[in-house]
Image (tube, rainbow, N blue to C red):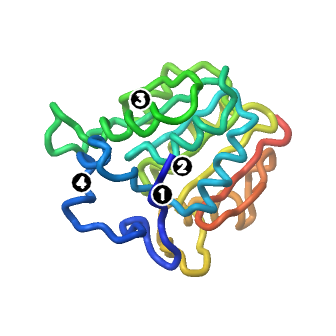
Amino acid sequence: MQIQFVAVPGNPAQSAPPLSRMLQHPVFAWAGLRAPIAQHTLAEHQALMRHASAASTIVEIGVAEGASAAGLREAMPADGTLYLIDPFHLSRIPALNFLKRAAWRAVGSSGSARTVWIESFSQDAARDWKSPIDFLLIDGDHREEAIERDWLDWSRFVKEDGVVAFHDARLFPGGWPTPDYGPVRFIDRAFRQGSNNPAWSILEEVDSLVFVSRRNRL
């Protein structure tokens, strides 16, 4: 499907081609008057789809307008299951919630895998979670402590040789993350600077995305 990706150099709040402030409202994506606005680059989108292609169970934390979720659903096996976790709590009109409606439209028009929407904060969804996960995308609350909480809550369900992707977690030329970004700080502390995660290692880095993989269970 058509998606408006982040231009580099640039930042996630600036999509290409430029849109007026009014047209950036998710009601226009829900109505089909514009494509979903992604908060990631085309290269990141392609990397997410590549890792999704062999994943039967995918969990995405943080959905926004559904651009990355649409790519995951398009790429993953048709008999797989995509779990999308987002409280969609920031809508100014809760009864309408056009951000959620825009996400539903984007994901529903891409791929055919079973999709389960979990309208909840990630820490609440984790309490009752039991299923093994092949691919986990962490892109919700970007505070460092929230990233660490999502990691601790969800990484234990990732299968051996499974993959976890962190968005906005790496500095790259022309990119928007800065050293004080929560995901950047967490990745540096947990996986780069004398890492105490011996069962996990960085697998790949694409623009702001960092992919880590579980190689051996301890």
Q: Using the image as rendered, state which of residue 4 and residue 195 is in the foreground.
A: 4
Write down the quadrant of residue 42 in the picture.
Answer: bottom right
Residue 17: percent from left, percent from top: 40, 69
Give the mark, 2 or 4, whose residue is nearer the N terminus.
4
Task: Judge whether residue 85 can be spotted in this image.
Answer: yes
Give the mark, 2 or 3, whose residue is nearer the N terminus.
3
Report crowding for label 3: few under 14, some 14 to 19, many 20 or more residues within 10 A (C-alpha): few
Residue type at the position of mark 3: Asp
Helix, strand or loop at label 2? It is helix
Residue drawn at x 42%, y 69% is 16
Q: Are marks 2 and 1 in contact (CB under 8 Å)?
A: yes
Residue drawn at x 58%, y 65% is 208
Where does label 2 land, which residue?
148
Q: CA distance from mark 3 to mark 4?
A: 28 Å
Where does label 4 land, which residue?
25
Q: Using the image as rendered, state which of residue 60 and residue 10 is in the foreground.
A: 10
Q: Is residue 122 left or right of residue 90?
A: right
Question: From the viewer's perspective, is residue 110 above or below residue 90?
Answer: above
Question: From the viewer's perspective, is residue 140 above or below residue 40?
Answer: above
Q: Which residue, as the protein is rendered here, is positioned at the far right?
A: 216
Helix, strand or loop at label 3? It is helix
Residue type at the position of mark 1: Glu
The residue mark sitting in front, 3 or 4, is 4
Where does label 1 land, which residue?
144
Q: Is residue 123 left or right of residue 159?
A: left
Give the mark, 4 or 1, whose residue is nearer the N terminus.
4
Residue type at the position of mark 4: His
Numbered label attached to residue 124: 3
Q: Are marks 3 and 4 in contact (CB under 8 Å)?
A: no
Write down the quadrant of residue 44 in the picture.
Answer: bottom right
